[in-house]
Image: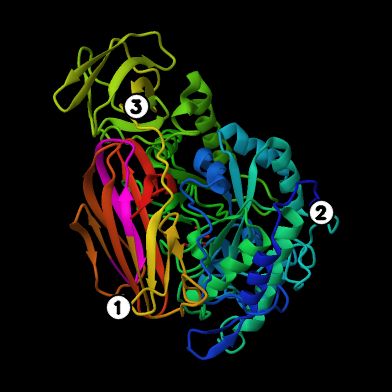
Amino acid sequence: MRTPHGRTRRRVTALTLLLASALAAAVLPTASAAPRPGPSAAGPGPSTAGPGTDYATDDPFSADRTSWFRKDRFGMFIHFGAYSNLEGEYTRPDGTVCRDAEWIQRQCDIPKDAYEKQAATFNPADFDAKAVVKAAKDAGMRYIVITSKHHEGYAMWPTKVNSWNLRDHSAFDKNRDILAELKKASDEAGIKLGFYYSIWDWHDPDFPDPATFPKYEKRMYAQLKELIDTYDPALLWFDGEWATDKPNNPWTARDGERLEAYLRGLDPGLVINNRVGKRRVVDGDYGTPEQEIPGAPVDGQLWESCMTLNGHWGYARYDQDWKSGTTLVRNLLSTTSRSGNYLLNVGPDARGRIPAPSVERLKEMGTWLRTAGQGEAVHGAGFGGLVEEPQWGTVSRKGDKLYAAVTQWPAAGSALHLKARTDFTVKSARVLGSGQRVEVTKSGDGYDLKPSGTATNPTATVIELTVDPGPTAPAGRGTGLKQEIFDTPELSGSPKVTRTDPSVNHSWKFTGSPDPDIASDGFGIRWTGAVEPRRSETYTLSTVSDDKVRVWIDGTLVIDAWSPHEPRIDKAQVNLKAGTRHSIRIEYAEQTGEAHMKLLWSSPGQEQQVVPREQLYPR
Ligand code: FHN
């Protein structure tokens, strides 16, 4: 099926649409626990969302669907809305000045009519999509996420759902559509485009009251369908999912379950963040730490750190507290070295222009990335894995290359030490952008790197190591684990279903279950068989579970989370031998509420992933 702008939409099967529409129409309790009819934005349909539904359709750590996101590493966030028209300052009728950016209406208690009046003068005539995309591409950014609707509820596209939008309520050219302009420019530049969409809506009168919230929800579904059908975004970045007031936010995890299923029914290729639900490890495809960088790869989920260039997301004319280009490059190196993405924000002004200091810093980042191939340490790279993160910089890995980005260059004759996490060898080393020799010697618990010259730049000098990561067995020929499903959480009696489960990668949430004959609550599962690692290393096994789980390896209980819990991660370190089929037994129980069960692994030489089918054998 061709979409309006020429891209072939991924084929959406009838079942996924049916499931999506059924979910949209499913009656689910609201925050007040009273049943609340879901919106029928996707149209009515028989309720297939129930026992037998499993929302885990792939492993975001290894699926083709998320491949671009895991490789791109660096994106541009754009906060642009009616709030931009005030440029961070609101002068009250009494002459006092109140300052904020995208929260200005709420934080400065601007009356609705006054806010609508100022929005009517909004005219971002100088918004230049090609210039925005060029700034992103020149910075080394590979994707863009723009606010299509922030908490103020103002749509930045000509939505048909209401008139509170840039087409119908502004002084802007009524023949222009900035999201369409951005989509065209992004496609031409080979940049992915995503949309930020706030669930929390300060403008829609039906939003705060759980009794009327379904009317808002139906409009929200309709707007999201407009965005997908009109602009074919690669990613949806939800926000405003948290419990709050002014106005009250009725959004629940069940609402998130239904919305995520609806969206995946519309476009199975979408990448969706975890704020579609309640910002948990079981929501969406990736976690969203904000204004901070996790110290290591995030357990159980991909992740992306979003950050401002100064102190505000939306434009604030008085905020000149800009991060330096060096800080920004080092932040990007830190996120990459922990297998995360960096979503760096710009806030266009009232005319739609990106502030010059923002453009300057993005140019500095792009220059560093383009110099001497230093961008290889970021694009397509990820967790260093083979070595501990050093004090003197960061280490990312891409295949047989380790990129040591040195921010504290050693004194002449001194060495940089890398602590090894596994047996691997260094075959060669070179400084990108310099012909200087680098002496590599085995030393204690790792390697010493002794460069013979000076750093190439003050931000970070990259030493590229070519390594042999050590023996990795060929992929196995496994088919999965034996799975026995019981209709009691005690796993008592005889199993109602016995089959081979290709991988332990399940998200039954509130409405689903492992089989149509198994109710959504009150079931138990036992998996048995063998797990065969491809490397002889210490593996970290992680379970993502709700309600209860325990795991045995070679008869030893290594994870014991046998008390009911909300969605959470439990981990164990186990020494596994390549080519050996270590026995594994997993017991899981769902009592009531949500149900999730995933088994992931990682090791110094193995990126985090759901344990794949070919390494699992039923017994
Ligand atoms: O309230 C928003 C805020 O305005 C901004 O959009 C950030 C960006 O991720 N998200 C929320 C705060 O967590």
Find residue 108 and report its horizontal and vertical position in percent: 53, 71
The residue closer to the viewer here, 454 or 324, is: 454
Eyeballing the image, is 368 above or below 175? Answer: above
Residue 536 is one of the magenta-drawn residues: yes
Eyeballing the image, is 602 above or below 283? Answer: above
Q: Earlier in the sequence, mark 1 or mark 3?
A: 3
In the figure, is residue 323 to the left or right of 492?
right
Residue 404's disc number: 3
Q: Which residues are magenta?
A: 528-549
Residue located 53% across and 58% down the image: 57
Mark pair 2, 1: CA separation: 64 Å
Tell me if I can see residue 293 in this picture.
no
Q: Amino acid at mark 1?
A: Ser
Residue annotated with mark 2: 176
The residue closer to the viewer here, 474 or 35, is: 474
Eyeballing the image, is 265 above or below 73? Answer: below
Find residue 71 and report its horizontal and vertical position in percent: 51, 38
The residue closer to the viewer here, 241 or 526, is: 526
Q: Amino acid at mark 3?
A: Ala
Q: Earlier in the sequence, mark 2 or mark 3?
A: 2
Residue located 39% across and 28% down the image: 459
In the figure, is residue 615 to the left or right of 346?
left
Eyeballing the image, is 613 above or below 450? Answer: below
Residue located 42% across and 42% down the image: 477
Mark pair 1, 3: CA separation: 53 Å
Ligand 1 within 8 A of label 3's CB?
A: no
In the figure, is residue 117 to the left or right of 75?
right
Q: Quadrant of residue 382?
A: top left
Q: Amino acid at mark 2?
A: Arg
- The kind of secondary structure element at disc 1 is loop
Find residue 310 and report its horizontal and vertical position in percent: 47, 48
